[in-house]
């Protein structure tokens, strides 16, 4: 699971500030659309996987976790309290992290040829 970011484990102060400003510009509608688009990319990746048992197993796991991100986000948007909202967003983060795990295994085990997986690498970077 290689990263395209700097080799430094912690971002410089300028980069961190830029990320905070960018995060402030994200709207609930934007996140709703992005999580939906994320699920669609996961579905397309699942369909492109080979039909062997390893690919099927990893693919099903990825499909389950990757498509639940948006569903959990929508549930968070309907929460009745701030605590419930935070909890549901935590569920979203757990599913994104799990999806990253399955994507890493698919990549590192060569389940999907790199040229087919590379366009989907954006799936991992957005999470």
Image: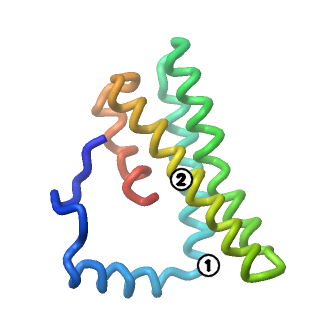
- In screen coordinates, is 30 left or right of 127? right
Q: Quadrant of residue 12?
A: bottom left
Q: Position of residue 83 (x, y in %)?
A: 73, 78
**Which residue is labeled 1 in the image?**
28
Q: Quadrant of residue 61?
A: top right
**Which residue is labeled 2 in the image?**
96
Residue lying at 30% horizontally and 85% vertically, measured from the top left: 17
Label 1 Cα crowd, 10 Å radius (few <14 / some 14-19 / many 20+): few
Residue lying at 22% horizontally and 54% vertically, measured from the top left: 4
State the colouring used for the structure image. rainbow
- In screen coordinates, is 90 left or right of 96? right
Q: CA distance from mark 2 to mark 1?
A: 17 Å
Residue nearer the viewer, 88 or 32? 88
Which of pointers 2 and 1 lies earlier in the amino acid sequence?
A: 1
Name above or below for residue 84 compared with residue 2. Answer: below
Q: Position of residue 45 (x, y in %)?
A: 49, 36
- In screen coordinates, is 79 left or right of 8? right
């Amino acid at each position: 699971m290689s990263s395209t970011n700097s080799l430094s484990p912690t971002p410089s102060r300028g980069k961190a500030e830029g990320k905070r400003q960018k995060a402030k510009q994200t709207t609930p509608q934007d996140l709703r659309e992005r999580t939906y688009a994320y699920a669609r990319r996961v579905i397309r990746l699942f369909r492109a996987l080979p039909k062997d048992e390893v690919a099927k197993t990893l693919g099903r796991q990825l499909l389950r976790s990757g498509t639940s991100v948006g569903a959990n986000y929508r549930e968070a948007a309907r929460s009745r309290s701030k605590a419930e909202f935070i909890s549901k967003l935590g569920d979203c983060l757990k599913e994104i992290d799990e999806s990253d795990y399955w994507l890493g295994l698919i990549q590192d085990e060569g389940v999907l040829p790199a040229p087919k997986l590379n366009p989907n690498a954006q799936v991992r970077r957005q999470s």
